[in-house]
Amino acid sequence: MAQALLIIEKNEDVPWINNDRVWEVTKNDFVILDPANPTDNERANKKCNKMALNTIYNGIDSKVFEQVKDLEKASEVWTRLEETYQDTTMIKTAKLYMLKDKLSIFKMKDDESILEMFYRLQVIIDDLKGLGEKVKD
């Protein structure tokens, strides 16, 4: 995920904002002491926060977005994503077991189209691959 933030281009309006600064705001919280009268540094942090949020939102799907949309700071979103997706071996094993079970009993539902069925199957396969499982075509 860290690589996603590295694609942000320098902002021409505020030349000292760069990828490193955006990443710093994402990894570490920041405070604006007087919201009515922010300093230049605080304004830059706020802009970096917006850039980081935009980048994160563009890199996640709608289901994940639903889990983080209530958070206002990129650092909060990043922390929640880390807590959710940094798996321990036990969690990874449990997820693999559940996904393999889903795959083994997979069948088309009565009320779904072939496209919908294929999408559900692809999600299972992608999740398995995402956990490092080799899936034959």
Image (cartoon, rainbow, N blue to C red):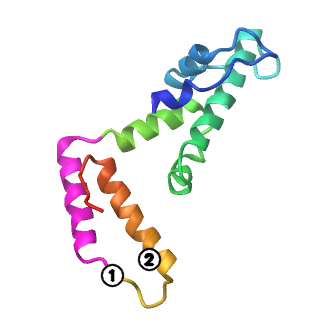
Residue 96 shows up from this direction? yes
Cβ atoms under marks 1 and 2 closer than 8 Å: no
Q: Which mark is residue 81?
A: none
Residue 33 shows up from this direction? no
Q: Nearer the viewer, residue 128 or 33?
A: 128
Residue 100: where, in percent of width, then height?
22, 64
Q: Main secondary structure of the magenta part?
A: helix
Assess disc 1: are there few (<14), some (14-19) or many (≥20) residues with their C-alpha within 10 Å of its C-alpha: few
The stretch in magenta equals 87-106
Residue at horizontal 41%, vertical 62%?
123
Q: What secondary structure is found at the residue carrying circle 1?
A: loop
**The N terminus: image quadrant:** top left
Q: Nearer the viewer, residue 71 or 23?
A: 23
Q: Is residue 63 above or below residue 101?
A: above
Residue at horizontal 27%, vertical 70%?
102
Q: Amino acid at mark 1?
A: Lys
Going by the image, does 18 lie left or right of 60? right
Question: Which residue carries the number 2 mark?
Answer: 117
Q: Nearer the viewer, residue 9 or 72?
A: 9
Residue 85: where, in percent of width, then height?
36, 43
Question: Which residue carries the number 1 mark?
Answer: 107
